[in-house]
Amino acid sequence: MVPTSQVGGWPAWLVLGLVALSLALAVSHAVRPSHRTLVAAVVTMAACFLGGLFGTAVGLARSFGSVASIDPALKSTVLARGISEAMNCTAFALGGTLLWSVPFVVGEVRRRRSGRPGAATPATGGPPR
């Protein structure tokens, strides 16, 4: 059994850290909606998504790169471990995006209904005039 700390390699921990940060900012946006928390939540979620793509690419490159110079009996094990790392990064990024969307949407609805400057009006969908 592989220890939990080695399940996804270092890219997975980067993605999990970005997910935690983006969730915290999305909840902050839901509690006190403003343009600043909106931008911060969107930027960190984009970074999380890009981190997931980066982790997927690193995991696949590492697994296929190490297969060329390894004992044939271990090739399937090493390849499976690298693909597992890549899929963990992808799953963490997608799961974080799904979790992030709920408090983010709540914050956006509250921000748009508040009537603050820069918020879209319900009738037009654009900024108030």
Image: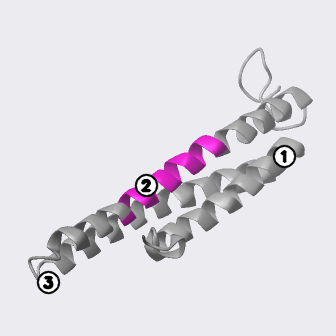
CA–CA distance in space, label 3 to label 2: 26 Å
Q: Report the front residue among 86 and 107.
A: 86
Callouts 2 and 1 close, C-beta under 8 Å = no
Determine whether, in the image, residue 9 is placed left or right of residue 18. Answer: left
Visual colour scheme:
one colour
Can the viewer see residue 33? no
Range of magenta residues:
85-99
Location of residue 84 by image quarter: bottom left
The amino acid on which the numbered mark 2 sits, given as a three-letter code, is Thr
Q: In this view, does 26 lie above or below 18?
A: above
The amino acid on which the numbered mark 3 sits, given as a three-letter code, is Ile
Q: In this view, does 42 lie above or below 54?
A: above
Taking the spot 51% from the left edge, 54% from the top edge, the residue there is: 93
Query: Mark 1 falls on what kind of element?
Result: loop
Taking the spot 72% from the left edge, 26% from the top edge, the residue there is: 126
On the image, the x and y values in percent for residue 85 come to 38, 65
Q: Earlier in the sequence, mark 3 or mark 2?
A: 3
Q: Mark 1 points at which residue?
A: 34
On the image, the x and y values in percent for residue 41 come to 70, 52
